Protein backbone atom coordinates (compact mmCIF):
# COMPACT_ATOMS: atom_id res chain seq x y z
CA UNK A 1 0.00 0.00 0.00
CA UNK A 2 1.23 3.47 -0.84
CA UNK A 3 -0.13 6.80 0.28
CA UNK A 4 0.74 9.98 -1.58
CA UNK A 5 1.45 13.52 -0.57
CA UNK A 6 -0.94 16.43 -0.91
CA UNK A 7 -0.19 18.44 -4.05
CA UNK A 8 -2.23 21.66 -4.39
CA UNK A 9 -3.19 22.82 -7.86
CA UNK A 10 -3.75 26.50 -8.65
CA UNK A 11 -6.27 27.95 -11.11
CA UNK A 12 -5.68 31.68 -11.32
CA UNK A 13 -6.49 31.92 -15.04
CA UNK A 14 -10.07 31.41 -16.17
CA UNK A 15 -10.97 29.22 -19.12
CA UNK A 16 -11.93 32.26 -21.19
CA UNK A 17 -8.69 34.05 -20.34
CA UNK A 18 -6.63 30.96 -21.11
CA UNK A 19 -8.30 30.64 -24.49
CA UNK A 20 -7.65 34.31 -25.21
CA UNK A 21 -3.97 33.84 -24.43
CA UNK A 22 -3.80 30.82 -26.74
CA UNK A 23 -5.89 32.32 -29.53
CA UNK A 24 -4.63 31.53 -33.02
CA UNK A 25 -2.16 28.92 -31.85
CA UNK A 26 -2.01 25.17 -32.22
CA UNK A 27 -2.29 24.98 -28.43
CA UNK A 28 -5.68 26.70 -28.63
CA UNK A 29 -6.99 24.08 -30.98
CA UNK A 30 -5.63 21.24 -28.89
CA UNK A 31 -7.08 22.71 -25.69
CA UNK A 32 -10.60 22.74 -27.09
CA UNK A 33 -10.82 26.53 -26.92
CA UNK A 34 -12.16 26.58 -30.45
CA UNK A 35 -15.46 25.14 -29.21
CA UNK A 36 -16.28 28.07 -26.93
CA UNK A 37 -18.34 29.80 -29.59
CA UNK A 38 -20.39 26.67 -30.15
CA UNK A 39 -21.00 26.37 -26.42
CA UNK A 40 -22.26 29.95 -26.20
CA UNK A 41 -24.57 29.41 -29.16
CA UNK A 42 -25.95 26.30 -27.49
CA UNK A 43 -26.57 28.17 -24.23
CA UNK A 44 -28.29 30.99 -26.10
CA UNK A 45 -30.51 28.55 -27.95
CA UNK A 46 -28.69 28.30 -31.30
CA UNK A 47 -28.21 25.09 -33.25
CA UNK A 48 -24.51 24.46 -33.90
CA UNK A 49 -23.75 21.24 -35.73
CA UNK A 50 -23.51 18.42 -33.22
CA UNK A 51 -20.56 16.04 -32.94
CA UNK A 52 -20.63 12.72 -34.74
CA UNK A 53 -21.96 9.77 -32.74
CA UNK A 54 -19.46 6.92 -32.48
CA UNK A 55 -20.11 3.30 -33.34
CA UNK A 56 -18.78 0.29 -31.46
CA UNK A 57 -18.19 -0.01 -27.73
CA UNK A 58 -18.21 3.43 -26.12
CA UNK A 59 -18.16 2.46 -22.44
CA UNK A 60 -20.84 3.63 -20.06
CA UNK A 61 -21.80 5.18 -16.75
CA UNK A 62 -23.63 4.17 -13.58
CA UNK A 63 -25.13 6.75 -11.23
CA UNK A 64 -27.85 7.22 -8.62
CA UNK A 65 -29.85 9.52 -10.91
CA UNK A 66 -30.82 8.46 -14.47
CA UNK A 67 -30.44 11.76 -16.37
CA UNK A 68 -26.96 12.24 -15.02
CA UNK A 69 -25.94 8.78 -16.28
CA UNK A 70 -27.46 9.57 -19.68
CA UNK A 71 -25.56 12.87 -19.87
CA UNK A 72 -22.32 10.96 -19.34
CA UNK A 73 -23.26 8.37 -21.95
CA UNK A 74 -23.94 11.11 -24.50
CA UNK A 75 -20.45 12.53 -23.96
CA UNK A 76 -18.95 9.07 -24.46
CA UNK A 77 -21.07 8.49 -27.57
CA UNK A 78 -19.71 11.66 -29.16
CA UNK A 79 -16.04 10.90 -28.51
CA UNK A 80 -15.39 12.22 -25.01
CA UNK A 81 -13.31 10.17 -22.62
CA UNK A 82 -14.17 8.98 -19.11
CA UNK A 83 -13.05 12.22 -17.46
CA UNK A 84 -15.13 14.31 -19.85
CA UNK A 85 -18.16 12.14 -19.14
CA UNK A 86 -17.57 12.31 -15.38
CA UNK A 87 -17.46 16.12 -15.49
CA UNK A 88 -20.76 16.28 -17.38
CA UNK A 89 -22.27 13.76 -14.97
CA UNK A 90 -21.10 15.68 -11.90
CA UNK A 91 -22.61 18.94 -13.11
CA UNK A 92 -25.85 17.20 -14.08
CA UNK A 93 -26.15 15.69 -10.59
CA UNK A 94 -25.93 19.22 -9.18
CA UNK A 95 -29.13 19.94 -11.15
CA UNK A 96 -31.01 16.64 -10.96
CA UNK A 97 -29.99 15.39 -7.50
CA UNK A 98 -29.25 18.54 -5.45
CA UNK A 99 -30.09 16.63 -2.29
CA UNK A 100 -26.69 14.93 -2.52
CA UNK A 101 -24.61 16.95 -5.01
CA UNK A 102 -24.43 20.70 -5.52
CA UNK A 103 -22.14 23.46 -6.71
CA UNK A 104 -22.02 24.28 -2.99
CA UNK A 105 -20.66 20.85 -2.07
CA UNK A 106 -17.65 18.76 -2.97
CA UNK A 107 -16.29 15.26 -3.22
CA UNK A 108 -13.43 13.16 -4.50
CA UNK A 109 -12.68 10.97 -7.52
CA UNK A 110 -10.19 8.35 -8.68
CA UNK A 111 -9.21 8.67 -12.34
CA UNK A 112 -7.31 6.26 -14.57
CA UNK A 113 -6.00 6.27 -18.12
CA UNK A 114 -4.40 3.02 -19.35
CA UNK A 115 -2.11 4.82 -21.79
CA UNK A 116 1.41 4.97 -20.36
CA UNK A 117 1.88 8.24 -22.25
CA UNK A 118 -0.78 9.81 -20.02
CA UNK A 119 0.30 12.42 -17.43
CA UNK A 120 0.32 9.76 -14.71
CA UNK A 121 1.92 6.96 -16.76
CA UNK A 122 -1.08 4.69 -16.49
CA UNK A 123 -1.34 4.89 -12.68
CA UNK A 124 -4.61 6.04 -11.03
CA UNK A 125 -4.68 9.36 -9.21
CA UNK A 126 -7.20 10.80 -6.77
CA UNK A 127 -8.77 14.20 -7.42
CA UNK A 128 -9.64 15.64 -4.00
CA UNK A 129 -12.13 18.50 -3.67
CA UNK A 130 -13.84 18.04 -0.34
CA UNK A 131 -15.98 20.95 0.88
CA UNK A 132 -14.30 22.13 4.07
CA UNK A 133 -15.21 24.62 6.76
CA UNK A 134 -14.56 28.36 6.26
CA UNK A 135 -11.83 29.95 8.36
CA UNK A 136 -14.16 32.03 10.49
CA UNK A 137 -17.41 30.09 10.31
CA UNK A 138 -20.39 31.64 12.02
CA UNK A 139 -23.94 32.19 10.88
CA UNK A 140 -27.08 30.47 12.03
CA UNK A 141 -26.69 27.74 9.38
CA UNK A 142 -22.93 27.20 8.86
CA UNK A 143 -22.04 26.34 5.28
CA UNK A 144 -19.04 24.68 3.67
CA UNK A 145 -16.72 26.29 1.15
CA UNK A 146 -18.05 25.23 -2.31
CA UNK A 147 -15.60 22.94 -4.11
CA UNK A 148 -17.46 21.00 -6.82
CA UNK A 149 -16.65 23.41 -9.67
CA UNK A 150 -12.94 23.55 -8.92
CA UNK A 151 -12.77 19.79 -8.44
CA UNK A 152 -14.44 19.01 -11.75
CA UNK A 153 -12.24 21.61 -13.44
CA UNK A 154 -9.11 19.85 -12.18
CA UNK A 155 -10.45 16.49 -13.38
CA UNK A 156 -11.12 18.02 -16.79
CA UNK A 157 -7.81 19.87 -17.02
CA UNK A 158 -5.68 16.88 -16.06
CA UNK A 159 -7.53 14.04 -17.79
CA UNK A 160 -10.15 15.44 -20.14
CA UNK A 161 -10.16 16.08 -23.88
CA UNK A 162 -13.24 18.28 -24.22
CA UNK A 163 -13.77 21.96 -23.56
CA UNK A 164 -14.86 22.36 -19.94
CA UNK A 165 -17.62 24.82 -20.80
CA UNK A 166 -19.14 22.43 -23.34
CA UNK A 167 -19.42 19.75 -20.68
CA UNK A 168 -21.48 22.11 -18.52
CA UNK A 169 -24.03 22.85 -21.25
CA UNK A 170 -26.39 19.88 -20.61
CA UNK A 171 -26.66 20.77 -16.91
CA UNK A 172 -27.22 24.46 -17.69
CA UNK A 173 -30.01 23.62 -20.12
CA UNK A 174 -31.64 21.19 -17.68
CA UNK A 175 -31.65 23.87 -14.99
CA UNK A 176 -32.90 26.61 -17.32
CA UNK A 177 -35.71 24.77 -19.08
CA UNK A 178 -36.66 22.42 -16.26
CA UNK A 179 -36.68 18.65 -15.89
CA UNK A 180 -39.10 16.13 -14.40
CA UNK A 181 -38.27 15.26 -10.80
CA UNK A 182 -36.68 11.80 -10.76
CA UNK A 183 -37.65 9.10 -8.31
CA UNK A 184 -34.20 9.45 -6.74
CA UNK A 185 -34.78 13.11 -5.91
CA UNK A 186 -38.40 12.57 -4.88
CA UNK A 187 -37.31 9.91 -2.35
CA UNK A 188 -34.82 12.34 -0.82
CA UNK A 189 -37.22 15.28 -0.83
CA UNK A 190 -40.21 13.64 0.83
CA UNK A 191 -38.82 13.21 4.38
CA UNK A 192 -37.28 16.70 4.62
CA UNK A 193 -39.75 18.80 2.65
CA UNK A 194 -41.05 20.61 5.74
CA UNK A 195 -37.75 21.97 7.07
CA UNK A 196 -36.40 22.53 3.54
CA UNK A 197 -39.26 24.71 2.44
CA UNK A 198 -38.87 26.91 5.52
CA UNK A 199 -36.24 28.74 3.45
CA UNK A 200 -38.11 30.99 0.96
CA UNK A 201 -35.49 30.55 -1.75
CA UNK A 202 -35.50 26.77 -1.38
CA UNK A 203 -39.29 26.76 -1.30
CA UNK A 204 -39.41 28.57 -4.64
CA UNK A 205 -37.41 25.71 -6.16
CA UNK A 206 -38.68 22.61 -4.36
CA UNK A 207 -42.27 23.68 -3.58
CA UNK A 208 -43.03 26.38 -6.18
CA UNK A 209 -46.80 26.20 -5.67
CA UNK A 210 -46.62 25.71 -1.92
CA UNK A 211 -46.63 21.92 -2.25
CA UNK A 212 -43.36 19.96 -2.33
CA UNK A 213 -42.47 18.51 -5.70
CA UNK A 214 -43.07 14.82 -6.26
CA UNK A 215 -41.85 12.39 -8.91
CA UNK A 216 -42.63 13.72 -12.39
CA UNK A 217 -43.11 17.33 -11.29
CA UNK A 218 -41.06 20.00 -13.03
CA UNK A 219 -37.86 21.11 -11.30
CA UNK A 220 -36.95 24.55 -12.63
CA UNK A 221 -33.76 26.31 -11.46
CA UNK A 222 -33.25 29.49 -13.47
CA UNK A 223 -30.87 31.11 -10.97
CA UNK A 224 -28.68 28.02 -11.02
CA UNK A 225 -28.78 28.07 -14.82
CA UNK A 226 -27.50 31.65 -14.75
CA UNK A 227 -24.64 30.66 -12.46
CA UNK A 228 -23.71 27.71 -14.66
CA UNK A 229 -23.82 29.91 -17.76
CA UNK A 230 -21.56 32.49 -16.13
CA UNK A 231 -19.02 29.86 -15.15
CA UNK A 232 -19.13 28.40 -18.65
CA UNK A 233 -18.61 31.83 -20.21
CA UNK A 234 -16.05 33.39 -17.85
CA UNK A 235 -14.34 30.31 -16.38
CA UNK A 236 -14.25 28.26 -13.20
CA UNK A 237 -11.99 30.83 -11.53
CA UNK A 238 -14.78 33.41 -11.55
CA UNK A 239 -16.54 31.50 -8.78
CA UNK A 240 -13.47 31.65 -6.56
CA UNK A 241 -11.82 35.00 -7.21
CA UNK A 242 -13.95 36.95 -9.67
CA UNK A 243 -17.27 38.78 -9.78
CA UNK A 244 -19.18 35.58 -9.13
CA UNK A 245 -17.08 34.97 -6.01
CA UNK A 246 -18.11 38.32 -4.54
CA UNK A 247 -21.74 37.71 -5.45
CA UNK A 248 -21.57 34.29 -3.80
CA UNK A 249 -20.01 35.67 -0.60
CA UNK A 250 -22.90 38.13 -0.23
CA UNK A 251 -25.49 35.47 -1.04
CA UNK A 252 -24.08 32.93 1.39
CA UNK A 253 -24.07 35.51 4.19
CA UNK A 254 -27.74 36.21 3.42
CA UNK A 255 -28.42 32.46 3.65
CA UNK A 256 -26.84 32.25 7.12
CA UNK A 257 -23.69 30.40 6.08
CA UNK A 258 -21.02 33.05 5.49
CA UNK A 259 -17.68 32.44 3.78
CA UNK A 260 -15.05 34.99 2.81
CA UNK A 261 -13.44 35.73 -0.54
CA UNK A 262 -10.22 34.35 0.94
CA UNK A 263 -12.02 31.10 1.83
CA UNK A 264 -13.00 30.72 -1.80
CA UNK A 265 -9.66 31.79 -3.25
CA UNK A 266 -7.52 29.60 -1.00
CA UNK A 267 -9.61 26.41 -1.15
CA UNK A 268 -8.10 24.41 -3.96
CA UNK A 269 -8.43 20.84 -5.20
CA UNK A 270 -5.46 18.51 -5.35
CA UNK A 271 -4.10 15.48 -7.17
CA UNK A 272 -3.09 12.86 -4.60
CA UNK A 273 -1.81 9.29 -4.86
CA UNK A 274 -4.57 6.95 -3.63
CA UNK A 275 -4.38 4.11 -1.15
CA UNK A 276 -3.33 0.97 -3.06
CA UNK A 277 -4.04 -2.64 -2.09
CA UNK A 278 -2.87 -5.78 -3.89
CA UNK A 279 -5.50 -8.19 -5.20
CA UNK A 280 -3.86 -11.07 -7.03
CA UNK A 281 -2.50 -9.78 -10.32
CA UNK A 282 -4.49 -6.57 -9.96
CA UNK A 283 -4.12 -3.50 -7.82
CA UNK A 284 -7.05 -1.76 -6.15
CA UNK A 285 -7.10 1.93 -5.29
CA UNK A 286 -9.19 3.69 -2.66
CA UNK A 287 -9.65 7.39 -1.95
CA UNK A 288 -6.81 8.74 0.21
CA UNK A 289 -7.03 10.79 3.38
CA UNK A 290 -8.64 13.07 4.35
CA UNK A 291 -11.47 11.16 2.61
CA UNK A 292 -11.67 8.56 5.35
CA UNK A 293 -14.35 6.66 3.47
CA UNK A 294 -11.49 5.39 1.33
CA UNK A 295 -9.66 4.30 4.46
CA UNK A 296 -12.82 2.58 5.69
CA UNK A 297 -13.22 0.81 2.35
CA UNK A 298 -9.58 -0.33 2.31
CA UNK A 299 -9.95 -1.78 5.82
CA UNK A 300 -13.08 -3.70 4.83
CA UNK A 301 -11.48 -4.88 1.58
CA UNK A 302 -8.55 -6.43 3.48
CA UNK A 303 -10.98 -8.53 5.52
CA UNK A 304 -13.07 -9.58 2.51
CA UNK A 305 -10.04 -10.57 0.43
CA UNK A 306 -9.15 -13.14 3.09
CA UNK A 307 -12.74 -14.26 3.74
CA UNK A 308 -15.52 -13.06 1.39
CA UNK A 309 -18.14 -14.25 3.85
CA UNK A 310 -16.81 -12.16 6.77
CA UNK A 311 -19.20 -9.29 6.12
CA UNK A 312 -19.81 -8.36 9.75
CA UNK A 313 -16.08 -8.32 10.51
CA UNK A 314 -15.45 -6.23 7.41
CA UNK A 315 -18.09 -3.72 8.47
CA UNK A 316 -16.60 -3.46 11.94
CA UNK A 317 -13.10 -2.96 10.52
CA UNK A 318 -14.43 -0.32 8.16
CA UNK A 319 -16.05 1.81 10.82
CA UNK A 320 -13.17 1.29 13.25
CA UNK A 321 -10.63 2.61 10.72
CA UNK A 322 -12.63 5.76 10.09
CA UNK A 323 -13.32 6.27 13.80
CA UNK A 324 -9.64 5.85 14.66
CA UNK A 325 -8.61 8.44 12.09
CA UNK A 326 -11.20 10.93 13.33
CA UNK A 327 -10.13 10.43 16.93
CA UNK A 328 -6.36 10.23 16.53
CA UNK A 329 -5.34 11.25 13.02
CA UNK A 330 -2.30 9.54 11.54
CA UNK A 331 -1.31 7.96 8.24
CA UNK A 332 -3.38 5.42 6.35
CA UNK A 333 -0.63 2.81 6.81
CA UNK A 334 -0.62 3.22 10.58
CA UNK A 335 -4.39 3.19 10.93
CA UNK A 336 -4.85 0.10 8.76
CA UNK A 337 -2.22 -1.72 10.81
CA UNK A 338 -3.71 -0.69 14.17
CA UNK A 339 -6.05 -2.76 16.30
CA UNK A 340 -8.06 -2.37 19.46
CA UNK A 341 -11.39 -0.85 20.41
CA UNK A 342 -12.34 2.66 19.34
CA UNK A 343 -15.39 4.83 19.90
CA UNK A 344 -18.24 4.26 17.47
CA UNK A 345 -18.92 6.73 14.68
CA UNK A 346 -22.00 8.95 14.99
CA UNK A 347 -24.70 8.74 12.34
CA UNK A 348 -23.06 10.16 9.22
CA UNK A 349 -24.50 12.23 6.35
CA UNK A 350 -25.63 11.06 2.93
CA UNK A 351 -23.59 11.03 -0.25
CA UNK A 352 -23.90 9.86 -3.83
CA UNK A 353 -21.49 8.03 -6.10
CA UNK A 354 -20.96 7.18 -9.74
CA UNK A 355 -18.53 5.45 -12.07
CA UNK A 356 -17.70 6.00 -15.74
CA UNK A 357 -15.49 4.19 -18.25
CA UNK A 358 -14.76 4.89 -21.90
CA UNK A 359 -14.18 2.56 -24.82
CA UNK A 360 -10.39 2.72 -24.41
CA UNK A 361 -10.39 1.61 -20.78
CA UNK A 362 -10.15 5.02 -19.14
CA UNK A 363 -12.26 5.21 -15.99
CA UNK A 364 -13.36 7.53 -13.19
CA UNK A 365 -15.08 6.67 -9.90
CA UNK A 366 -16.41 9.51 -7.72
CA UNK A 367 -18.25 10.21 -4.49
CA UNK A 368 -20.01 13.57 -4.01
CA UNK A 369 -21.78 15.11 -1.02
CA UNK A 370 -23.42 18.17 0.49
CA UNK A 371 -22.23 17.02 3.95
CA UNK A 372 -25.91 16.52 4.82
CA UNK A 373 -29.05 15.64 2.90
CA UNK A 374 -29.83 18.94 1.10
CA UNK A 375 -26.83 20.51 2.86
CA UNK A 376 -27.86 23.44 5.04
CA UNK A 377 -31.34 23.35 3.55
CA UNK A 378 -30.83 26.85 2.13
CA UNK A 379 -30.09 28.23 -1.32
CA UNK A 380 -27.78 31.22 -1.72
CA UNK A 381 -30.18 33.88 -3.10
CA UNK A 382 -29.67 34.85 -6.74
CA UNK A 383 -27.22 31.99 -7.42
CA UNK A 384 -29.38 28.88 -7.26
CA UNK A 385 -26.61 27.13 -5.31
CA UNK A 386 -27.81 24.83 -2.55
CA UNK A 387 -25.26 25.25 0.23
CA UNK A 388 -23.44 22.28 1.71
CA UNK A 389 -23.24 22.01 5.48
CA UNK A 390 -19.98 22.95 7.13
CA UNK A 391 -18.05 19.93 8.46
CA UNK A 392 -17.40 22.06 11.54
CA UNK A 393 -21.13 21.86 12.30
CA UNK A 394 -21.95 18.35 11.05
CA UNK A 395 -19.87 15.15 11.04
CA UNK A 396 -18.25 14.59 7.65
CA UNK A 397 -19.62 11.80 5.43
CA UNK A 398 -17.69 8.74 4.36
CA UNK A 399 -16.72 9.33 0.72
CA UNK A 400 -16.00 5.90 -0.76
CA UNK A 401 -14.83 5.14 -4.29
CA UNK A 402 -12.53 2.43 -5.62
CA UNK A 403 -10.86 1.52 -8.91
CA UNK A 404 -8.91 -1.61 -9.89
CA UNK A 405 -6.40 -1.97 -12.70
CA UNK A 406 -3.64 -4.28 -13.90
CA UNK A 407 -0.28 -2.52 -13.99
CA UNK A 408 1.38 -5.10 -16.24
CA UNK A 409 -1.39 -5.09 -18.83
CA UNK A 410 -2.05 -1.34 -18.49
CA UNK A 411 -5.73 -2.19 -18.35
CA UNK A 412 -8.83 -1.28 -16.36
CA UNK A 413 -10.51 -4.01 -14.31
CA UNK A 414 -13.30 -2.53 -12.17
CA UNK A 415 -14.69 0.57 -10.46
CA UNK A 416 -17.12 0.94 -7.59
CA UNK A 417 -18.63 3.71 -5.53
CA UNK A 418 -20.27 3.20 -2.16
CA UNK A 419 -22.88 5.13 -0.20
CA UNK A 420 -25.24 4.39 2.66
CA UNK A 421 -23.95 6.73 5.36
CA UNK A 422 -21.90 4.70 7.88
CA UNK A 423 -21.95 1.69 5.53
CA UNK A 424 -20.43 3.53 2.56
CA UNK A 425 -16.93 2.13 3.08
CA UNK A 426 -18.16 -1.45 3.39
CA UNK A 427 -20.39 -0.95 0.34
CA UNK A 428 -17.48 0.11 -1.89
CA UNK A 429 -15.24 -2.67 -0.58
CA UNK A 430 -17.87 -5.38 -0.92
CA UNK A 431 -18.78 -4.26 -4.43
CA UNK A 432 -15.12 -4.28 -5.49
CA UNK A 433 -14.49 -7.70 -3.91
CA UNK A 434 -17.53 -9.09 -5.73
CA UNK A 435 -16.42 -7.58 -9.04
CA UNK A 436 -12.93 -9.05 -8.76
CA UNK A 437 -14.20 -12.41 -7.56
CA UNK A 438 -16.91 -12.79 -10.18
CA UNK A 439 -19.76 -12.64 -7.67
CA UNK A 440 -23.05 -10.80 -7.95
CA UNK A 441 -24.31 -10.68 -4.37
CA UNK A 442 -26.07 -7.44 -3.38
CA UNK A 443 -24.21 -4.98 -1.18
CA UNK A 444 -25.29 -5.48 2.47
CA UNK A 445 -27.91 -3.04 3.76
CA UNK A 446 -27.86 -0.14 4.36
CA UNK A 447 -25.01 0.20 1.88
CA UNK A 448 -25.53 0.95 -1.79
CA UNK A 449 -23.08 0.73 -4.70
CA UNK A 450 -22.68 1.47 -8.40
CA UNK A 451 -20.28 -0.89 -10.17
CA UNK A 452 -18.42 -1.33 -13.46
CA UNK A 453 -16.67 -4.66 -13.94
CA UNK A 454 -14.57 -5.85 -16.90
CA UNK A 455 -13.52 -9.48 -16.28
CA UNK A 456 -11.55 -9.47 -19.55
CA UNK A 457 -10.06 -6.03 -18.86
CA UNK A 458 -10.28 -2.92 -21.01
CA UNK A 459 -8.61 -2.47 -23.38
CA UNK A 460 -8.99 -6.19 -23.94
CA UNK A 461 -12.50 -7.60 -23.98
CA UNK A 462 -14.73 -4.55 -23.43
CA UNK A 463 -17.80 -6.39 -24.67
CA UNK A 464 -17.69 -8.42 -21.44
CA UNK A 465 -17.86 -5.32 -19.24
CA UNK A 466 -20.86 -5.10 -16.91
CA UNK A 467 -22.47 -1.88 -15.70
CA UNK A 468 -24.63 -2.25 -12.59
CA UNK A 469 -26.60 0.40 -10.74
CA UNK A 470 -27.77 -0.63 -7.27
CA UNK A 471 -31.27 -2.09 -7.83
CA UNK A 472 -32.49 -0.68 -4.50
CA UNK A 473 -31.83 2.85 -5.62
CA UNK A 474 -33.48 4.75 -8.47
CA UNK A 475 -30.39 5.17 -10.63
CA UNK A 476 -29.35 3.90 -14.03
CA UNK A 477 -26.60 1.97 -15.77
CA UNK A 478 -26.20 3.52 -19.23
CA UNK A 479 -23.81 1.80 -21.62
CA UNK A 480 -23.67 1.20 -25.35
CA UNK A 481 -22.07 -0.60 -28.26
Image (cartoon, grey):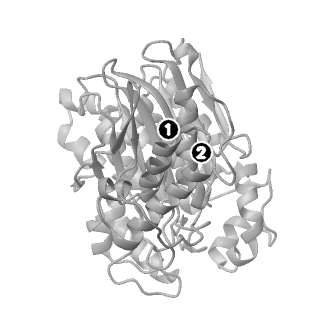
Considering the image in quadrants, where does the N terminus appear? Answer: top left
Q: Is residue 460 above or below residue 28?
A: above
Q: Residue at 61% across / 35% down in the picture?
A: 70
Classify mark 1: helix, strand or loop.
Answer: helix
For residue 3, say whether it is visible.
yes
Q: Which quadrant of the structure image shows residue 124?
A: top left
Residue 157 or 448: which is nearer the viewer? 448
Q: Position of residue 101 (x, y in %)?
A: 55, 57
Q: Residue at 28% across / 45% down in the picture?
A: 273
Question: Tag on residue 197?
Answer: none
Considering the image in quadrants, where does the C terminus appear? Answer: top right
Q: Position of residue 298 (x, y in %)?
A: 44, 47
Q: Which residue is mark 1?
A: 306
Q: Position of residue 295 (x, y in %)?
A: 41, 54
Q: Which residue is mark 2?
A: 310
Q: Residues within 10 Å of mark 1 (few under 14, many from 20)?
A: few
Q: Residue at 64% across / 41% down in the picture?
A: 67
Classify mark 2: helix, strand or loop.
Answer: loop
Residues marked 1 and 2 touching at CB (< 8 Å): yes
Q: Is residue 89 above or below residue 367?
A: above
Q: Residue at 52% across / 22% down in the picture?
A: 454
Disc 1 versus disc 2: distance between alpha carbons?
A: 9 Å
Q: Is residue 257 above or below residue 154?
A: below
For residue 48, say whether it is visible.
no
Q: Is residue 23 left or right of residue 426?
A: left
Q: Residues within 10 Å of mark 2 (few under 14, many from 20)?
A: few
Q: Is residue 331 above or below residue 442?
A: below
Q: Is residue 216 left or right of residue 173?
A: right
Residue 36 or 1: which is nearer the viewer? 1
Amino acid sequence: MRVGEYQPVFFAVSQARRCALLAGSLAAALSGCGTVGAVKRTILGGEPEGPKVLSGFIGGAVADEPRAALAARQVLATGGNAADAAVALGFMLAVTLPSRASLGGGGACIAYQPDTDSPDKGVPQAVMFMAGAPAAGGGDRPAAVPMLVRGLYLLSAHYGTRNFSALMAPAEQAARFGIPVSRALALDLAPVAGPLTADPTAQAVFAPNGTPLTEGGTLLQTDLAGTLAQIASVGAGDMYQGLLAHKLVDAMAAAGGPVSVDDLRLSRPALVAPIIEEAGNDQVTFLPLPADGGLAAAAAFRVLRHDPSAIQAAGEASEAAAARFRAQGGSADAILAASGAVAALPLLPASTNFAVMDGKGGAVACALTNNNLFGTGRIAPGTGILLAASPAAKPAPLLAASLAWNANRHAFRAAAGGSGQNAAGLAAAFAMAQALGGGAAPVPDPGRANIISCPGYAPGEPSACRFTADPRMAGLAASGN
